[in-house]
Each structure stands twice: as C-alpha cells, then as structure tokens.
Amino acid sequence: MLLIQLYHNRSSAVYQRIINQEGYSLSLVKEGVAVEFFLKPEWIPKEVGETKLNLVVERKFDSDIILEKVGKSQKHFYIQLNVVPHPNRSSGQLLNISHITNDSFINSNGPEWQITDTTGKDLLGGTYGGGEGPGNAISVDIPDTELSKFAQGAHVRFSGFYLYGYAKFNQSNVTIWLSALFPLLVIACLIMLYRKRSEPEKNLGWKLIGHMLLGGFTFSLNGLRLPLGFVIYLLFFRKPRPNLSIKDKAALLGLAMYVLQLVVPPVLSHLDSIPKQSAWGNVSIEQLGFDGVWKMVMARAPVSNQARVEGFETVLAQNGEVIELEFQLFDPDANGRYNRINAVYHASEQSVTLKRSLTNEKLQYSGAFLADDFVNRVQQLELLKLKPAGGEHRYVMLELDPLHGSYAMKNESNFGVDEKGVYPIGDEQLPITATRLIVCAPQSLDKMSACEDDVNYYFNIVEGGMRE
C-alpha cells in the first residue's frame, strides 16, 4: 500500500509540473476530444444523495475517463466525470478539461454535452447546466422535470476535453552528472593534498587553491587557449619551500582542469551526435488526423516553430488510409547547433518511432519549408489525395523533394496544384520554380520495392507552370 501511495504522489507531482510547465513544454494537440457511455437508469438516485460509481468508461491518450458518480439534489440530478492522466517523466500525452496557456487555465463554455435516448433522439434540447472542478472533474446538471426521459437509460456524450502533448526540457544526463561531480571531485582532491602535507604551514589550504588556479590559468591567442599559468609556475615557483610536493600537485590539478576543458566538450558533442531513439504508443491517426499526428510529434519530440522539413514521405492504402508517415526535420537550437529529427508513424501499431541527434552541419536547402507551413499546405491543398498515373493502385506513396527550385522535367507527367485543384502542365510551360511532390505506386510495403506510374505535382509555384 505504501508503494502504491508513493507512486501516486510521484505521478501527481509530475502531472502538476507538466501542466504548470515547470521544466516541461506543453502543447495543445486537439480540442473537442469526446467520450461516450450508456447511463443506466438504476444509477440515478431516487432520493437526495449520490451513487458513487468510479467506473472507467474509456481509456485514451494515456488517461482514464471515469464516471465518478450520479447524484440528486432537491431540484435536479447530475452526472460527474473525471479525467485521471498517467504522466510519463520524459514525454507523453494527456487529457484535460481546460485550455492551458502559459499563464492561465481557461474552461470552454460551448455545448459539450449531448444526451440521447436509445433511438438517438435528443433528450434535453439544451436545457441543462454544467459545473467544473475540483481538478479535472466535470459535471452536467439536469432538471428533475426531465427525469422521466431517463427511465430506459440514456447515451451520454461529452466532447469538451483538450488533448496535450508534453516533453521534459532536454538536458544530457552526462552533462548533469559532470556539472554535479566536477566541483566535488576538485574539492576532494584539494582535501587529499592538504592531508598529505609534510609540515604545518599557515593558510596552506588557500595556498593550494592559489596554486591550482595558477596551474589552470590560460591565455587566449587567436582563439587558441595556452596554459600560460602552468608555464609561469614552472619558471618562477619551483624553488625549495615548505610542502613543495603537494603544491606541485595542486598546480598539476589546475593543468588537468585545463586539459579537461579541451577534451570534455568534443566528447560531449560526440555523445550528443549519436542518434537517440524512442517510441510512443497510443497515437491514432483516425482520432487525431494528419494534423493531430504532426502536432503530437511537435509536442513530444519536441520541435520548435523554426524547424524545417528536410524530407517527407507517406504510404497510403487504396482507400486513402495512411499506412505510414515519415517526417525528416532540421531544427536549430539555442546554442547554434541543429537537431536532426526523424519521426515515423506506423498506423498498424498506432506508434511513433523518433530518432534525433545534434549536429553542427547546416541544412543544405536554404529554401526548405518551415515544418508548420508544410503541414498547413498539405491540408489546404489536400495533397494526400493526389494519385499516381494509371488506374487504381493497392498502395500510393508521396515523397517530398525539399528543394524549392527550378524543374524542367519534359516528357513526364507534370501537374500543378493550387487552391482550385489539380491542373496539367505542358512541356512548353517549363521550366517551373516550385516545390515538387512525387507520387507513385509501390508494388509492396518493402522499402526497396519499385515505385511505378510516378507523377510530378508542383505547388507553391513562383514562376512557370501557372494555371492557364
């Protein structure tokens, strides 16, 4: 029991840090997430009081939606729901009843409750009240005059939940440990040297610190840091004096600190450059849509609004359902380096596999899409509905050419895409300056499978290939 209590206290503390954005980034992914359940007539008290149920009516997005109780007062009865998230310490998703901004929690006042009978007829017609809190509790109040309509039970739908993705601010565990251990290690070394003194000496501790600082003193010349302090020590401080041996070692300790400053940053940079992989489950494109999956990747990677698309590829079934989505992103960080992020969504597993690494290499394509702009264009132009040449195909693959450049693909299938739809582009209209999306029909889901009947679709056209 104690372990369970400790777990819940820990989980509650993590949840509070997430929603208060203390050490976590939190992003809205979707509004209007709904839950539906059947309200049994025997759950409604006949007298003033409560029927405590605590039934989990649905589990979604790493949260339990609970029908806590059905209660009755003098003039109305009420149904109360609650949401219990199960937060992850690193990244995850959760439901909440509030629209959370940087400094406030805002509750929606829209028509979120819908109650119907077994035939689908609306029982209330808007004649109900609502309540919120404490925490994630939400309730609907129904006048007693409507009670007879619930004799056979009712279908209850609430569509006022907000879905969020979150991620802990990234900080290398190696960096954290080094930051904590390095001062302790230096202090321990100085204490060991002090204890090995050969004779008493006034203010020896401060002298050892001074020797260490002198040994680690550097002079910068054309960006190159030279150990000038240790050279000065060798030239002027080697004459015989009390406790010379430990003073030499204190100066060497300072020199060792200088060497570590040269060695550790490249080592940490190398460790950061090693791709790190993670995977998340319970991500459904049927529930979130293309835009929602992208927002979840943005929230949980996390990805800044300055990220650019280095590559995009998706495979769809014949009926248009997404089988796989892949985003390749390039995201600058605050230290002048770049995060390379590869996120792959697998519809069959409802999961996302994420790989990320740090690099000093800049993006090759200066005209590459801002990631948010690209996702918006995919939706505005309905790019996922584009088809390869020929008739129906079992699979359809779309691949983005991230370079916004000039193309002259003569004797090929070329089409433009704008807000009005798709239109043909003739060879006489080439070259064309635009963004290209290649659509073809793979023979199988194998990455090495041949892709046939390819078509070039151009959008965001700047020059050439305009609709006539």
Image (cartoon, grey):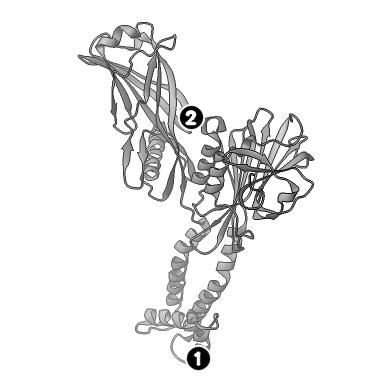
- Up-down relation of residue 385 to residue 192 (above or below): above
Kind of residue at disc 1:
Arg
* Dot label at residue 171: none
Q: Position of residue 330 (x, y in %)?
A: 58, 55
Q: Residue at x 67, y 34 (%)?
A: 316
- Up-down relation of residue 16 to residue 63 (above or below): below
Image quadrant holding the C terminus, namely top right
Q: Is residue 314 left or right of residue 335?
A: right
First of labels 1, 2 by sequence position: 2
Report how far apart the C-alphas of labels 1 and 2 lie in the structure: 72 Å
Query: Which label lies toward us, 1 or 2?
Result: 2
Q: Residue at x 52, y 47 (%)?
A: 372
What residue sits right under mark 2 in the picture?
Answer: 60
Q: Residue at x 78, y 42 (%)?
A: 448
Q: Secondary structure at mark 1?
A: loop
* Dot label at residue 238: 1
